[in-house]
Amino acid sequence: MIGFAARRLLQAMIVMLVVALLAFTMFRFVGDPINQMVGIETSLEEREALRERLGLNDPIPVQFLRFITQAAQFDFGTSYQFRQPVSELFAKRIPATLELSFASALFALVVGIPMGIYAGLNRESAISKLFLSVSLIGISLPTFFIGILLIFLFSVTLQWLPSFGRGEVVQVGSWWTTGFLTLSGLKALILPSITLGLYQMTLIMRLIRAEMLEVIRTDYIKFARARGLPDRLVNFRHALKNTLVPVITITGLQLGAIIAFATITETVFQWPGMGLMFLQAVQNVDIPIMSAYLLLTAFLFVAINFIVDILYFFIDPRLRVGRP
Amino acid sequence: MNVLDIKDLKVEFPGRKSVFVAVNGVDMSVEAGKILGVVGESGAGKSTVGNAVIGLLQEPGHIAGGEIYLHGKRIDQLPYKQKRLLRGRKIGMIFQDPLTSLDPLQTVESQLVETIRTHLPLSAKAARQRAVELIDSVGIPNADERIRQYPHQFSGGMRQRVVIALALCAEPELVIADEPTTALDVSIQAQILELMKKLCAERNVAMLVITHDMGVIADITDHVAVMYHGDLVEYGETTQVLGAPVHPYTQSLISAVPRPDIRVDRFPVVNYIEKAGTPQKQIDISTHWLGKSRDYGKVSGPLVKIRDLDMAFETRGSIFPSRRKYFQAVKKVSFDIEEGETFGLVGESGSGKSTIARLITGLYEPTGGSILFGTTELTSLKNRRDVLAMRRQMQMIFQDPYSSLNARMRVRDIIAEPIKFHRLASSNAEVRQIVDDLLDHVGLGAAAGKKYPHEFSGGQRQRISIARALATRPRFLICDEPTSALDVSIQAQILNLLKDLQEELGLTMLFISHDLAVIRQMCNRIGVMRHGELCEVADCDALFETPQHAYTRELLSLMPSLELLSRANLQTVDHPEA
């Protein structure tokens, strides 16, 4: 297991290096960084001095090495538009995105898994068919449309829930702000997390259903029934556990996707997270923020995948013992 | 008093257009301590009987008529909940494939304990104690230790013992075993059958053994019920039914079982289930395409000469050669195959016999040794054209006729593919003609070419595979368990076909099988393999009569005795409609 983890870690590092190279290329070669920083009236000498000071005249490998070293210490340079260190900007935004992602992942799992189990066990029932039709809508409607629909229904017409923002937030520790502790914060979370999690929910539901149908047909489930085990044990201890390996894979990947691609939802709900900041950065060609966002997203994906791989060991005993 | 009584049982599977009657009015009963065998070929409805008794018929199948009694109490009409309580507690079941019958994610202990505690009011500790005793009683050594392991840590035979322990763990009165040894090697099969016999007698349980294997029936059952297409065609004491079968189907079934004791020229042709299909058009091999350019040039000495053949598979990769681990599948194997003979390779699973076939055909590259085909050293062929020329001369017939044919191609195209690939015919019209002739020759008829593989039965598909193998005009044919997926009557037809073809075309054959009786009927010389090593090579009769190696003797002693089977009136029985 340690060897396996070490190998995966090595692969993860290679992936991160490649992404860092991309981010660096974008930072260094998409437009001239100096032009982005200074005004029109800056003289050529001043520009050259700035270039020298920022190390932009050093050989490329040296610059790349410096970029990596700084990135490893969360130093991504200064934002062109805000004139603030990028890392500080992200620190302010990360809690909002992570809380939203967490809430929507929770929603997707808590609703999707039981629905999937039910639809897998009672494939002919009317409710299962209803689940499937509804889930088709969840998969085929674009996120922004669902968001606008929800806002129209619950914020404009019924006026139950806020249509934008995080509500009141509470400062926890030195840099984390949470909306979980106030009523308005929780209320503000509901619509965006449903919007963001709907697609994942339908995906998980359909996946669990398909896996359940597959597992139910296996010999060991038949044998468990032939031993007279109650349905509860057969369905949950034997069938459900065996469906989990692929479900964990997909859930892990989807969690990464939720965090990285919350952009649209954050825009629709004016959620003050990383996605919204990224979009603004794109509009203003704020390269440091963009390259930092790229790195951060890649890091999240790699980290989640790594955790998923390790989780397999706890679920499937066949992987635990070394092969002969 | 009988433990199980089945009276006029009828099981139906409603389909879209019509109702399929899987079991049609069957009566049978089992006493405590006795074993009843239900025998028949695929589609006979024998498994459906077992599933109906335990109440696990696959939807939409249902009992359409008749009664099932357990100890005089009617059970077929019980509500679901009460039926569930019977399962495991009163009726235990053993399945065919031990590799898939156990939940891979639960330890053996947790599966046993949950079953015991479902049925018996025991504490967790007492249940565990009982589980250990059970595991011990089914002959798994070191029970206390091994019970904590997961199913994948047990071998196939050991897993089947665990399955038996699970079936017995609440002291059921009736055990249904559905093909309990079909997936196992002969030596393991003998042990498992022995164990079942012993447990049946010791615990005084009634046993219903469902199988297609006459050997198993002859070995352990007291009574036997022969089923054919849902009907019970013959029922009685095993010695009676096997020794003096009355119904023509039973007679034909018994006559189709390959004889291990003497070699007969041809298998008795059994036409009861599927028409054997004789060549519809006689082809004169001497003038036909199939027989042309067959003179590959005479070789002095054997056609295939294998010397010190080695094959190792890497089981753990590493960048350091010293840390790599290998599994030695074939160890220093040497033998010759003479031109025109059939050489048999026999052994249990994992003995390396299929690996040798793949090494000869070039599907694997050997790690050592040499394979001489005629005058060509196969292991040193580099040139693609030479490799293709060699491959054309040798063809393979695989075990599973369901997965060895491309389901998306028409039969005609499947057979034409090798002819076109090797450019053996000058025009498309000629290819078409050859394919039609081949289909005729293997007994399918040219009209079969328009169909897709799924429209054929297993035996017919194996005929397609044979036609495809012949399509390159091969000199050397490798048959890797060609009939082990087939019913016994179909097996007889296919083996006869192979014998005929060999005679007509002068083919050299390597015939791989785990079934000693089949090997005896098919081969001139036989090699016995075990753990990748060749134990013994001998002429067919010599091997069976005076085996030299200890392992050969062991294998021979494990063959189910078929002395009970009547060989007196081996008559040919024709299909009723034919």
Image: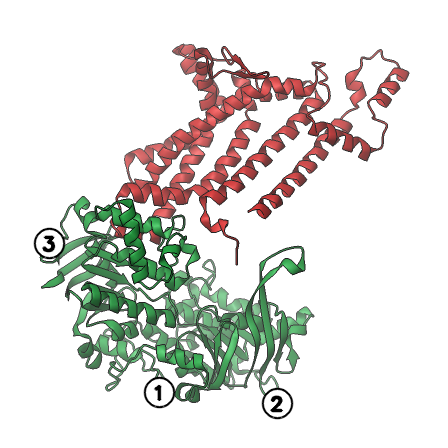
Chain colours: A red, B green
Residue B247 in sight: no
Q: State the residue at coordinates (48%, 76%).
A: B529
Task: Tell me the subunit letter for badge 3.
Answer: B
Task: Compute the Cα span from label 3 to label 1.
Answer: 48 Å
Near-viewer residue (A293 or A6): A6
Residue depicted at x 77% and y 33%: A65
Q: Are marks 2 and 1 in contact (CB under 8 Å)?
A: no
Q: What is the quadrant of residue A80 in the picture?
A: top right
Name the residue carrying label 2. B300
* SS for callout 3: strand
Helix, strand or loop for disc 2:
loop
Give whichever of discs 3 and 1 has the lower sequence position.
3
Q: Say whether residue B192 is left or right of residue A147.
A: left
- Of the residues under marks 2 and 3, which one precedes in the sequence? 3
What residue sits right under mark 3 in the picture? B74
Quadrant that contains the N terminus of chain B: bottom left
Instruction: Tell whether B115 sits left or right of B301.
Output: left
Q: Residue B96: x, y in percent?
A: 33, 61
Element class at badge 1: loop
Q: Earlier in the sequence, mark 2 or mark 1?
A: 1
Q: CA distance from mark 2 to mark 3?
A: 73 Å
Q: Amino acid at mark 3?
A: Arg
- Residue placed most toward the observer, B573 or A261: A261
Local crowd at mark 2 within 10 Å, few (<14), some, or many (≥20)?
A: few
Q: Which residue is mark 1?
A: B262
Q: Position of residue B189 (x, y in %)?
A: 34, 69
In the displayed structure, A122 sits above or below B396; it is above
Q: Amino acid at mark 1?
A: Ile
Q: Is residue B79 above or below residue A304?
A: below
Q: Position of residue A57 (x, y in %)?
A: 86, 27
Please, which chain is the residue tagged with disc 1 on? Answer: B
